[in-house]
Amino acid sequence: MAEKWTAEERAAIKDRAAEVKGKKVDGLTAVLEKIAAMAPADRKIAESIHRLVVKIAPGLEVKTWYGMQAYFLDGKAVLFFQDAAKFKSRYSTLGFQDSAQLDDGDMWPTSFAILAWSSAVEKKVSEIILRAIERA
């Protein structure tokens, strides 16, 4: 039996196709529009991540990736934020691509569930982002 894509997965693929085709939309504008469309709890997390990335890693390029806010270095996605509604998940996710090189032995996390933003979460996320970009 062939697997079927969910409506959310098809939408993400369409978003990515539009991004690859090079729609002439400013990356920052596209990300801010995606954030503004999120549910309030996810929007707060997304805005906090965006402010943090801009503050501690201003060299990263801001643009969407599969319709999600993402941050790139040398044309490669380093990290992205997936709001809970994107795929009808229980929680939002901060994910890192392999270009982040978060390698730590034979096994390490590359995505993190975030239920709410706090100073403790911000500290942990800051440490991971800084580690990701120093190795990327």
Image (spheres, grey):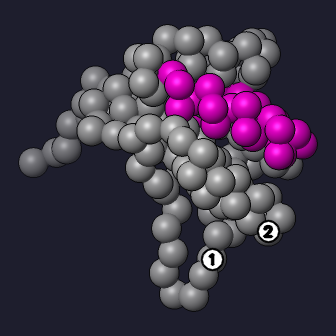
Q: Is residue 10 visible?
A: no
Give neighbour class at mark 1: few <14, some 14-19, many 20+ (Cα, 10 Å): few
- Is residue 48 located in the magenta-colored stretch of the structure? yes
Badge 2 marks a residue whose secondary structure is helix
Q: Look at the picture and state if 55 lies above or below 19.
A: below
- Is residue 45 located in the magenta-colored stretch of the structure? yes
Q: Can residue 127 be seen in this view?
A: yes
Residue positioned 63% across, 77% down in the render: 103
* Label located before the other in sequence (2 or 1): 1
Which residues, given as a range, are shown in magenta? 43-66
Q: Residue furthest left?
A: 1
Counting from the top left corner in percent of width and height, residue 132 is at: 72, 61
Q: Look at the picture and state if 35 lies above or below 1.
A: above
Counting from the top left corner in percent of width and height, residue 47 is at: 62, 26
Q: Which residue lies furthest to the bottom in this view?
A: 105
Residue 124 or residue 26, whichever sits in front: 124
Q: Which quarter of the figure is the C terminus placed in?
A: bottom right
Q: On the image, numbered disc 1 is attached to which residue?
A: 103
Asked if the residues shown at circle 2 and circle 1 are in contact, with their CB atoms under 8 angstroms apart, the answer is: yes
Residue positioned 69% across, 32% down in the render: 50
**Label drawn at residue 60:** none
Q: Look at the picture and state if 86 lies above or below 126.
A: above
Counting from the top left corner in percent of width and height, residue 135 is at: 79, 68
For the residues labelled 2 and 1, the Cα–Cα distance comes to 9 Å
Residue positioned 48% across, 81% down in the render: 107
Q: Look at the picture and state if 130 lies above or below 89.
A: below
Counting from the top left corner in percent of width and height, residue 51 is at: 73, 31
Decide if residue 55 is on the left or right side of residue 119: right
Badge 1 marks a residue whose secondary structure is loop
Residue 65 appears in which quarter of the rendering? Answer: top right
**Label drawn at residue 135:** 2
